[in-house]
Image (cartoon, grey):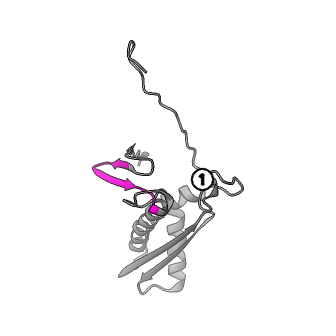
Amino acid sequence: MSDLKFRVKAYSENPTKTIVKARGFEIIIDEPADLGGTDEGANPVEYILAAFCGCINVMAHVIAKEMNIELRSLKIKMVGELNPNRLFGTSFDDRAGYKGIDVSIEPECDATPEMLAKWMEAIEDRCPVSDNLRHITPVNLKLKKKRVKEGALA
């Protein structure tokens, strides 16, 4: 299979609220009130955890099926810890992103501990979001200036 491209478009509704369009879906990103937002959606780092949970869910089911493990249910919990000082420009000692993410996966199934260990290893290896979090992904940030028509006031 050839590479897939995923695209989103976004616009700023206010200094903390972003509206993102992904296919036919609208995602609202906002900060909680205690971080200056209007609390109308999860914040960007919560969406990273949510995306990671979603990816683990998909991979857990795909791999369980391949391994003939019948998943009756699956619970996923994540906790990410970050220092907001860099975000707010008060200190540059720590990185801006998560220092670590703890993931707890609780399957309800009849698989042996050995099968579950192989299942977990395959999930971590094959989950695209996990891969993006564990490895450096080149990011090309470009400034696009809005063009002003000749004769118009800037």
Region in magenta = 19-33
Identify the residue under disc 1.
88
The image position of residue 94, as x and y in percent, is 69, 58
122 is within the stretch colored magenta: no
Residue type at mark 1: give it.
Phe
| Left or right: residue 56 compared with residue 40 | right
Of residues 149 and 4, the one nearer the viewer is: 149
Q: Residue furthest left?
A: 24
Q: Main secondary structure of the magenta part?
A: strand
Of residues 99 and 64, the one nearer the viewer is: 99
Question: Please, is residue 134 above or below residue 1 in the view?
Answer: below
Is there any visible trace of residue 75 in the rendered image?
Answer: yes
| Left or right: residue 126 compared with residue 54 | right
The image position of residue 3, as x and y in percent, is 44, 46
| Left or right: residue 141 compared with residue 68 | right
Is there any visible trace of residue 71 in the rendered image?
Answer: no
Secondary element at image label 1: helix
